[in-house]
Image (spheres, helix red, strand yellow):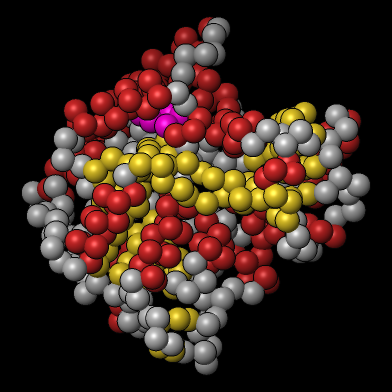
Amino acid sequence: MNQEDYRKLIRGEKAGLSAAIVRPLLRAAAAGYRVIVAVRNFLYSKGRLKTYRVNATVISVGNITVGGTGKTPLVVWLCKFLLQKEFRCAVLTRGYKTHTQIRGMRDEGRGMRDEGRGMRDEGRWTRDERRETKIDEPAILAEGCPQARIIVNPDRVAAATEAVNKFGAKALIMDDGFQHRRLHRDLDIVTIDATCPFGCGRVLPAGLLREPVTALKRADAVVITRCDQVCETELSETEKRLRQINPDMIIARSVHKPICARFADGKEIGIEQLKGKRVFAFCGIGNPQAFSGTIKNIGAEAVGFKIYDDHYHYTIEDIADIEEQAGRVKAELILTTQKDWTRIIGDFRFPISDFQSPIPFAYLAIELKFISGEDKITQLLEDTLTGKIQKRNDA
């Protein structure tokens, strides 16, 4: 069963005998999973499982559902904020299907220099290093935050220790860290996708929740993403439920603002130029409908859309098939996400620009833009960095 069929099954959109048999089995498995999550959280809350601290401010960015909720653009935004405040920062990420652990920035003889605006690391990934690792989020983070240290290690405590002791980081951003309780954090920010805020209402595998929504009691702030893809009534209902769960947490709204379509040679097409253009799109991300919605919102004419599983690794045959389908519908542009683009570059031994296609390939570059609550998030960050707010415990 592919990802899209699975989502239809848990949303109740898939009919038939097999669906009627599988759903109760998934709910039974979910009950067991829920017990395991509850016991683990209880042990951490009571101090039975040890939490480790490091000599740096730790900001966790996570979510309560599987699939893409827009964490990466928020991490990039946080990096830029910290660098503007002259904090030497590092991003801790586990990576996905990592073939080799990397640090994102090369450290061979380059060192760290203070240029009056905080410490900068002049090294960055080479193209060959990105291809060998075959991972997407760390590559995007390295590109979006060239002055931050990117440390890929599933052991977040070890990564945090390395960032502090070896690189002198004073602020750490733990990517996808809400469920990672082992490393103490000073601030928990959770991203909630406005298009699917509560994961179909059930924990895995009967739904998309990593843990029950009551876990949001641990959160200090929630950033609702993709707010431009739902109506105000839905947003208000989401906020109302969030406040019922945790009245004290800050709630902000944001959108993934498209910047341009970017090609392999660095050339760009502005968003205005994409309006009315015949686009064939494809992606292998956690929430493909969100990408489809973004294309619709910018005014492009979507003449075809191909969905792959999340973190899908493309073959040359896949790219040839995409180009063939795009040609059949007379597309003027083949468009994908930055994560897919980065993965393609990493998997192939040649740049995508070398693939001979009469239809140009590009990815849609985006950035996080707050539409409300940015001032509250900023103040919360500043208070945390200056020690005015300290997390009472890891409950």
Q: Is residue 159 magenta?
A: no
Q: Nearer the viewer, residue 107 or 315?
A: 107
Task: Pick the quarter of the image with the N terminus.
Answer: top right
Tell me where residue 66 appears, x and y as whole percent: 43, 38
Magenta-highlighted residues? 194-198
Relative to 109, does residue 323 appear above or below in the rendering? above
Residue that appears at 88% across and 32% down:
330
Can residue 40 be seen here? The reply is: no
Tell me where residue 341 appears, x and y as whole percent: 67, 52
Q: Name the side, left or right, on which 111 lies relative to 192.
A: right
Residue that appears at 42% across and 32% down:
194
Name the dominant secondary structure of the magenta segment.
loop
Q: In which quarter of the image is residue 304?
A: top right
Q: Which of 172 and 154 is in front in this view?
A: 172
Residue that appears at 46% across and 18% down:
11
Residue that appears at 78% across and 57% down:
352
Q: Quadrant of residue 2?
A: top right
